[in-house]
Image: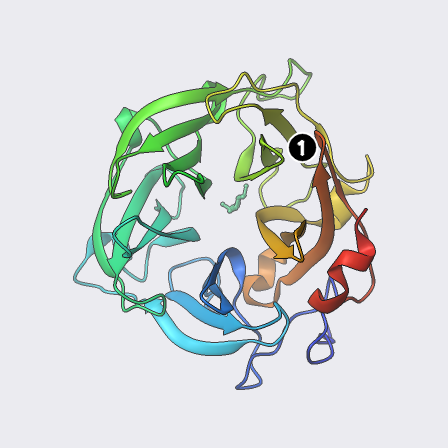
């Protein structure tokens, strides 16, 4: 397959970003935070395929121009969870109330039976992050994860637990431990062979006093119609799940990874950040990042061939 990268400074969904070295930015399963004056991104380095090659860190002023800062978390054969035979997915970072950076990871074995959440900490967004440990939160299987920090600093871990559902866990004050499940959501009863289950690849935002929870159906690297639900608090009650992209478009052939809030002149808009996986060449998987309208209980992602962060507010309602 011939890859056509996005033009520099432009977000072109379905086209990879080249970083400042001219390499494909490894922004897969990415977590993104706006810190001080730029966006930091922590992505799965998939250049070696599905096994662990490090968590790549980048920064950008515009979500399109990416500077590589090296691996924020390195492969470490001395630490079993970080060995080159491991699978490490969906690195998500929060700055805790003490100002430390806490990285959450889906730590796996290649057969996906390990199913744990891992923690690492650093004093700078670029790392190096020090790995702490992994666990099954409150004894539960934990596959795809997301994180959310509320306005009052309360942190939450979102974690997919197969037929038991998608859990919203409240974190300890320093974000280094899981305290309790505040909500669990399930897909509607369906004829899906798995029966009711939790959506995966979860992401949460809050706007207008309402919480929005996003996730994808369980179809591995294949894409599906991703869904969202709303609630007045992270503890719920959560609404029914519904589409935020045209039904049948498989979320414009992508899987949600996170949603980035952008505030300007008292207005708020959002960026949908998704992956279009190429299972046989995961490192070349293209970002599908799009303007997103979220408000008054509605969420809608809008297809654009090319766009820039500067014109985000021209695309949304
Ligand atoms: C997806 C998941 C990805 C990866 C993949 C492996 O369901 O969202 O992060 O784990 O399965 O097949």
Q: Is residue 310 in view from this perspective?
A: yes
Q: Quadrant of residue 128?
A: bottom left
Q: Position of residue 106 (x, y in %)?
A: 38, 46
Locate residue 2 relative to residue 248 in the image: left or right: left
Residue drawn 49% across and 72% down? 59
Relative height, residue 17 to residue 50 (above, below): below
Q: Residue furthest left?
A: 78
* Nearer to me, 43 or 217: 43
Q: Residue furthest front?
A: 266
Residue drawn 69% across and 77% down? 9
Relative height, residue 41 to residue 109 (above, below): below
Q: Position of residue 175 (x, y in %)?
A: 29, 42
Q: Is residue 218 in view from this perspective?
A: no
Locate residue 15 relative to residue 148 in the image: left or right: right
Q: How many marks?
A: 1
Q: Quadrant of residue 65?
A: bottom right
Relative height, residue 67 to residue 138 (above, below): below
Label 1 C-beta lies within 8 Å of the nearest ligand 1 atom = no
Element at label 1: strand
Q: Position of residue 309 (x, y in %)?
A: 69, 65
Q: Quadrant of the N terminus?
A: bottom right
Q: Residue furthest bottom?
A: 21
Residue drawn 47% across and 71% down? 58
Q: Which residue is under mark 1?
A: 227
Q: Residues within 10 Å of mark 1 (few under 14, many from 20)?
A: many
Residue drawn 65% across and 31% down? 228
Q: Position of residue 256 (x, y in %)?
A: 62, 46
């Amino acid at each position: 397959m011939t890859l056509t990268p996005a033009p520099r400074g432009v977000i072109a969904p379905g086209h990879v970003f080249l970083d400042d070295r001219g390499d494909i930015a490894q922004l897969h399963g990415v977590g993104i935070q706006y810190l001080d004056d730029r966006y930091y991104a922590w992505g799965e380095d998939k250049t070696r395929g599905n096994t662990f090659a490090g968590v790549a860190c980048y920064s950008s002023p515009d979500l399109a121009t990416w500077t590589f800062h090296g691996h924020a978390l390195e492969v470490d054969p001395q630490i079993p969870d970080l060995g080159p035979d491991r699978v490490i997915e969906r690195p998500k970072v929060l700055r805790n109330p003490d100002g430390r950076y806490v990285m959450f990871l889906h730590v796996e074995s290649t057969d996906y039976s390990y199913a744990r959440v891992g923690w690492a900490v650093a004093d700078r967004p670029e790392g190096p992050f020090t790995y702490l440990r992994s666990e099954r939160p409150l004894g539960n299987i934990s596959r795809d994860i997301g994180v959310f920090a509320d306005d009052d600093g309360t942190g939450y871990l979102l974690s997919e637990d197969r037929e038991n559902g998608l859990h919203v866990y409240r974190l300890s004050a320093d974000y280094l431990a899981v305290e309790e499940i505040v909500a669990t959501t399930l897909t509607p009863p369906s004829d899906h062979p798995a029966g009711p289950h939790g959506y995966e690849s979860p992401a949460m935002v809050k706007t207008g006093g309402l919480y929005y929870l996003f996730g994808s159906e369980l179809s591995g690297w294949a894409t599906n119609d991703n869904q969202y639900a709303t609630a007045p608090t992270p503890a719920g009650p959560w609404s029914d799940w519904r589409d935020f992209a045209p039904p049948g478009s498989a979320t414009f052939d992508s899987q949600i990874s996170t949603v980035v809030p952008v505030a300007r002149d008292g207005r708020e808009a959002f960026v949908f950040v998704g992956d279009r996986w190429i299972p046989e060449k995961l490192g070349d998987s293209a970002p599908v990042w799009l303007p997103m309208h979220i408000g008054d209980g509605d969420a809608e992602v809008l297809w654009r061939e090319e766009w820039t962060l500067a014109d985000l507010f021209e695309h949304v309602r």
